[in-house]
Image (tube, rainbow, N blue to C red):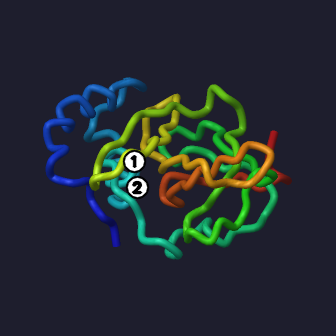
Amino acid sequence: MINNKPSDQDSANVEKKKILTKLNKTEEEWKKELSKEQYCIMFEKGTERAFTGKYYDHHEEGIYTCAACNSHLFSSETKYDSGSGWPSYFQPINKEAIAYERDTSYGMIRTEVLCSNCSGHLGHVFTDGPKPTGLRYCINSASLNFIPKAEIK
C-alpha cells in the first residue's frame, strides 16, 4: 500500500512535471518504464509501508541503484538495520549521487533525498544514524534496484 503525498502539495505537481523532463523523458514515458508503485513513490513523493519493501531486510553485498535511471546511490557497506522498516544507509556512494530538498509535508520539517540524476524521490535523511556520519538515509525499496557484488563492472 502506498501513501500518496498530501493534497496541499497539489500546486507542486506543475513544478514536478518540469523536473520529470530532466532526462528528456515525459511523465508518460516514466509511467511506462516504472511500476505504478515506483512512479507514485519516485515522482509523486509517496512512500511504501514500513517492513514491506524488498530491500529493508536485504543483506547481500553490492550496490543499490536508482530504480528510474540506474545511477549508483548506496553501497551495501553503508547499509544497516535502523529498525525503521525501510532500507537505511549512513552515507551515499558519493556526494554527487544525492540531491536534497526541504520537505514540510505532513506537518513536519524533513530533508528529502532525491536521485541527483533524474530527481526521483528516494526517501528522507535524518540525523539519528550511526557513526561515522550520524546520518540515516531512510529510503523506499521501490526507489531502488540492486546489483550484486559479483555483477559490478
Q: Residue at x 51, y 31 (%)?
A: 99
Q: Residues within 10 Å of mark 2 (few under 14, many from 20)?
A: many
Look at the picture and state if 54 lies above or below 115: below
Q: Residue at x 37, y 54 (%)?
A: 41
- Residue 50 in the image: state x and y as whole percent: 48, 72
Q: Quadrant of residue 56?
A: bottom right
Relative depth, front residue between 6 and 150: 6
Look at the picture and state if 84 lies above or below 88: below
Q: How many discs mark residues in the rendered view? A: 2
Marks 1 & 2, CB-CB < 8 Å contact: yes
Q: Secondary structure at mark 2?
A: helix
- Residue 123 in the image: state x and y as whole percent: 48, 50
Relative depth, front residue between 62 and 30: 62
Q: Residues within 10 Å of mark 1 (few under 14, many from 20)?
A: many
Look at the picture and state if 10 lies above or below 59: above
Residue receiving disc 1: 42
Amino acid type, callout 2: Gln
Which quadrant is home to the C terminus? top right
Q: Quadrant of residue 15?
A: top left
Look at the picture and state if 57 lies above or below 25: below
Q: Is residue 91 left or right of residue 30?
A: right
In the displayed orientation, state which residue is furthest to the right. Answer: 150
Q: Residue at x 29, y 49 (%)?
A: 105
Relative depth, front residue between 135 and 2: 135
Residue receiving disc 2: 38
Q: Residue at x 31, y 44 (%)?
A: 104
Amino acid type, callout 1: Met
